[in-house]
Image (cartoon, rainbow, N blue to C red):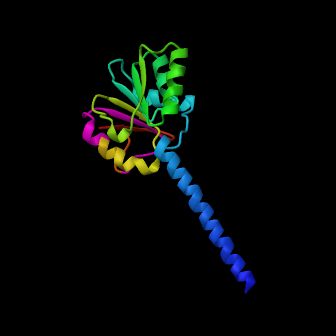
Amino acid sequence: MLFFILIILIIICFVLIIWLLWSIYSIYLLFFGAPFVRSKTEDIEKMMALVHLKKTDKIVDVGCGDGTIVIHVGQQGYKIEGFDINRVLVWRAQRNIEKLKLKTNTKVFTSDVWKTDLSPYSVIFLYGITYMMPGLEKKIQAELKPGSRVVSNFFTFPNWKPIKNEGKINVYEI
């Protein structure tokens, strides 16, 4: 009997630990947004090649994190903006942009994707996450002009077919 009580107590402790870890993760997401994963340089170059950027494009990196994509695209001479909900990552991106003297063609700011008007942009870069892709698909469809392009690293939209695909990089046209 004592053995079964011990097993039940272990199970209860395990469940409480899992619940606590999930709560901590939820609080992290509340303050810092989706987990940050930096795009690799080769992926950024592939994204740029597939989307065929033009100097007239109005470009944004949604969830720009530390500004890796913004910096890389800016270094190629394109004007680009980026935003992220995580203030610490935005601050880091702004410092990196200052160090590289890219302030004339890059801008990074703190914003929530769900509260940001995407209509001014003709190209969106993103490295989303599975749970946000369906809602983001609806938002982009409603706000972007026909002919606008979205290039996604790894995660796909549930209802759109990419016009171009290379490995985990997908390009969509509105």
Tell whether 32 sits left or right of 62.
right
Q: What residue is at 51 percent from the left and 16 percent from the top? A: 98
Task: Answer yes or no: is residue 33 visible.
Answer: no
Q: What residue is at 35 percent from the left and 48 percent from the top? A: 135
Q: Is residue 132 above or below residue 152?
A: below
Task: Answer yes or no: is residue 59 visible.
Answer: yes
Q: Quadrant of residue 51?
A: top left
User: Magenta segment: does it hold 85?
Assistant: no
| On-image quarter of the N terminus | bottom right
Q: What residue is at 43 percent from the left and 19 percent from the top? A: 106
Q: Position of residue 154 (x, y in %)?
A: 49, 42
Q: What residue is at 59 percent from the left and 56 percent from the top? A: 21
Q: Is residue 172 above or below residue 12?
A: above
Q: Quadrant of residue 20?
A: bottom right
User: Magenta segment: does it hold 144?
Assistant: yes
| On-image quarter of the C terminus | top left
The region drawn magenta spans 140-158
